[in-house]
Image (cartoon, rainbow, N blue to C red):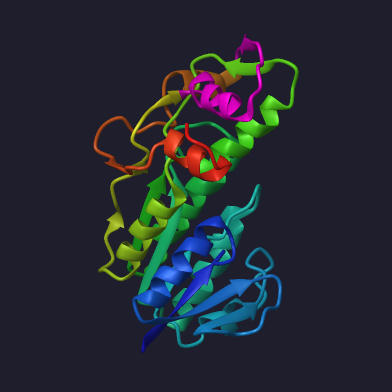
């Protein structure tokens, strides 16, 4: 077996795809998570909390490569700074980080924490790689499901998304993790740009539902940024192959 790789957020959606791929490539994997789990099949779990800085040094012991997937609704910047400080002391040789397209362009508090996380990684002194990805199909589905529960489906005018399959993001991250540090690499998007109504229609059809669609306007600077496509990468991105319709067909168990 080769050296151990520490994965933060290894029990989440993305981690659930990444960890088996790393194991298949012959690597021992250590996962830093807030909940204790037994070690199994070359996967070691270390209990800790990045936001509090607890358990991070123990998780990094002996790991030369770190794949930072952990994220939440707030505090990502502080959590990443805690990880970076500990990783620098531990002599980590490659720090790989997943971020989001638009982190440097969309004026939302959560996006600012993602951008500050990117800066913490880039300024760490550790050789690094950062991949910005579009919204996962899984997240787009969650959003559509919630809106479809309303009697009228709200459609923010000008909002477009490039949803990408989380398995394709995982495969790209594993490739980057096992390669040389590369800095900020090309963004990864899905194969198509969709308005929210475009995402909703095949979902509603598969569910056998009908909803009137109501145009709404996203206010303020964030609305202007989304209408300008600040959350998109229309040129120079790598594109996944799996479409939204294919994802829905698999997830919902029917042909789209």
Give above or below for 250 relative to 178: above
Q: Which residues are magenta?
A: 195-218
- Of residues 197 and 3, the one drawn nearer to the viewer in this rendering: 197
**Location of residue 10 by image quarter:** bottom right
**Residue visible at 37% across and 38% down?**
190
- Looking at the rendered image, the quarter that the N terminus falls into is bottom left
- Of residues 214 and 114, the one drawn nearer to the viewer in this rendering: 214
| Residue 112 seen in the current view | no
Give above or below for 24 relative to 160: below
| Residue 153 seen in the current view | yes
Describe residue 145's horizontal placement relative to residue 135 as left or right. Answer: right
**Location of residue 82 by image quarter:** bottom right
Give above or below for 206 relative to 12: above
- Of residues 116 and 249, the one drawn nearer to the viewer in this rendering: 249
**Residue visible at 31% across and 63% down?**
176
- Residue 117 position, x and y percent, is 50, 54
30 is within the stretch colored magenta: no
Q: Residue furthest front?
A: 254
Describe residue 187's horizontal placement relative to residue 5 as left or right. Answer: left
**Location of residue 27 by image quarter:** bottom left
Number of numbered discs on residues: 0
Give above or below for 12 relative to 233: below
**Residue visible at 43% across and 25% down?**
194
Describe residue 79's horizontal placement relative to residue 126 as left or right. Answer: right
- Residue 131 position, x and y percent, is 37, 52
211 is within the stretch colored magenta: yes
- Residue 185 position, x and y percent, is 29, 51
**Residue visible at 60% across and 85% down?**
39
């Amino acid at each position: 077996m080769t050296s151990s790789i520490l994965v933060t957020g290894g029990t989440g959606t993305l981690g659930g795809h990444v960890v088996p791929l790393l194991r298949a490539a012959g690597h021992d994997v250590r996962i830093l998570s807030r909940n204790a789990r037994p070690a199994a099949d070359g996967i070691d779990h270390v209990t800790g909390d990045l936001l509090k800085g607890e358990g991070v040094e123990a998780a990094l012991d002996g790991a030369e490569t770190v794949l930072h997937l952990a994220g939440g609704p707030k505090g990502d910047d502080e959590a990443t700074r805690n990880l970076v400080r500990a990783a620098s002391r531990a002599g980590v040789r490659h720090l790989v980080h997943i971020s989001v397209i638009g982190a440097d362009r969309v004026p939302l508090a959560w996006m600012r924490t993602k951008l500050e996380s990117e800066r913490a990684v880039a300024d760490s002194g550790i050789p690094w790689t950062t991949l910005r990805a579009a919204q996962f199909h899984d997240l787009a589905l969650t959003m559509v499901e919630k809106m479809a529960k309303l009697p009228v489906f709200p459609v923010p005018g000008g909002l477009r998304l490039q949803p990408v399959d989380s398995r394709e993001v995982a495969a790209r991250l594993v490739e980057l993790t096992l390669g040389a540090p590369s800095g900020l690499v090309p963004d990864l998007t899905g194969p198509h740009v969709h308005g929210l109504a475009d995402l909703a229609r095949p979902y509603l059809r598969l569910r056998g539902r009908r909803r009137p669609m109501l145009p709404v306007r996203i206010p303020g600077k964030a609305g202007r940024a989304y209408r300008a496509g600040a959350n998109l990468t229309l040129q120079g991105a790598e594109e996944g192959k799996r479409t939204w319709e294919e994802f829905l067909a698999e997830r919902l168990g029917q042909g789209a």
